Image (cartoon, rainbow, N blue to C red):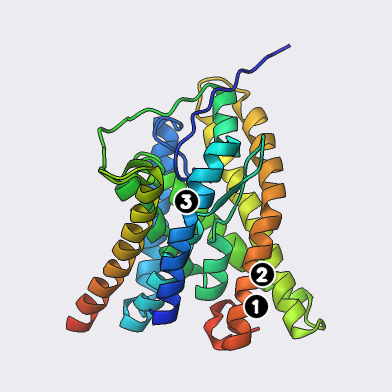
Amino acid sequence: MEKKLLILLIFMVFLSPIFGVILAEKVGYHEPLDIAASLLGLKEHDIVNYHTPFEDYSFPGLGPVAGYIASGLLGVAIILAIGVIASKLVKSR
Amino acid sequence: MLIFRVHISMRNGAPLLHIPDGFLDVYWITITYLATIGYFTIIGKRSRSIFRPETISTVTTIAAIVFVAQMFNWPIPGGTSLHFLGSALAGIILGPALGSIALALVLVVQALVFHDGGITTLGANILNMAIIGVLTGYATFRFFMRLLKNTDGKKRIFISSFMAGWISLFIAGIACGLEIGLSPRFPYGVLITIPVMGIWHLVLGVVEGIITGLIVLYVYERNPHLVMGLEGI
């Protein structure tokens, strides 16, 4: 990935809690999927016992805003790392 | 008269079209997983170009952009949020097969690392956003590129990408509504979910279209060869 693009993505991750956390809490909005599901009485529940320390873009030991940023950086790092590992595997074949 | 009570919890990270665990019954879980596995098996066998380092790098770059873009939700008071899904963008820039892989990578990371979207519903989420959304976006883009062949280059790219973003979000929303509407054990679920999902995503699709149009135009102006959806047009 180009360095400029990576810097832009990191900058965007730092901005993202303004929209994903702060404004969301102030405004209290709901996605259409949640509205449709609640009209049907569908409830979110675990069918398989799966938990992650980064549930809903939180991060252990950090508040919602810092956690959202840390989660964003972690997500980008994981996706790019998968790319690097996959490229190396392909090259070595 | 039926009165519905709406109780919805707030959480970080907008669910967009990410169906959580518990919304789909076992039949839909099975059907959507099988359809998704079948699709990726076919493109894995057909698209040998996937297994090149430069292709992998492009796919993961687009996946990282879509992942970050999906973290931006501009809440609308009393309603929903303006957000970006990225299915059409991935389809236009990468083509249908690689676009689907990029979106699927984002959805797998979101589900497994952040539990955004369920584990049992991962097949459905990939089907709706990485397959239906990407294929619809790609096909719509090419349809409008051909339809507008006498239009000025930049305008043609923007309108075609705008329509691709708009229609792909609408269709992905309808598919999601169909799956959750047919899951409960009563017959009128789809009569509720299809209008809710359809109307909202028809409106939200305008934003998806504008963002898709601007990004594709930006990439096209710098290097048209990077827009794989233009191949053969």
The answer to whether tags 2 and 1 share a subunit is yes
| Residue positioned most to the top | B1
Q: CA distance from mark 3 to mark 1?
A: 27 Å
Q: Nearer the viewer, mark 3 or mark 1?
A: 3
Badge 3 and badge 2 in a common chain = no
Q: Furthest residue to the left?
A: A92
Query: Residue at the location (26% across, 44% down)?
Result: A60
Q: CA distance from mark 2 to mark 1?
A: 6 Å
Q: Please tell me how crowded label 1 is: few (under 14), some (14-19), or many (20+) other residues with Cα within 10 Å.
A: many
Residue ID for mark 1: B217
Tag on residue A17?
3
Q: Which residue is mark 2?
A: B213
> Residue A68 at what x, y percent from top left?
39, 50
Question: Which of the two marks, 3 or 2, is nearer to us in this view?
Answer: 3
The answer to the question of whether label 2 and label 1 lie on touching residues, with beta carbons closer than 8 A, is yes
The quarter of the rendered structure image containing the N terminus of chain A is bottom left
Can you give x and y, in whole percent of width and height, for residue B17 in the image?
52, 45
Q: Is residue B181 visible?
A: no
Instruction: Count neighbours of disc 3 (C-alpha within 10 A) and say few if under 14, some if 14 to 19, many if 20 or more.
Output: many
- Left of A86 or right of it: where is A37? right
Check the residue under mark 1 and report the chain it is in: B
The kind of residue tagged 3 is: Pro
Three-letter amino acid code at the position of disc 2? Gly
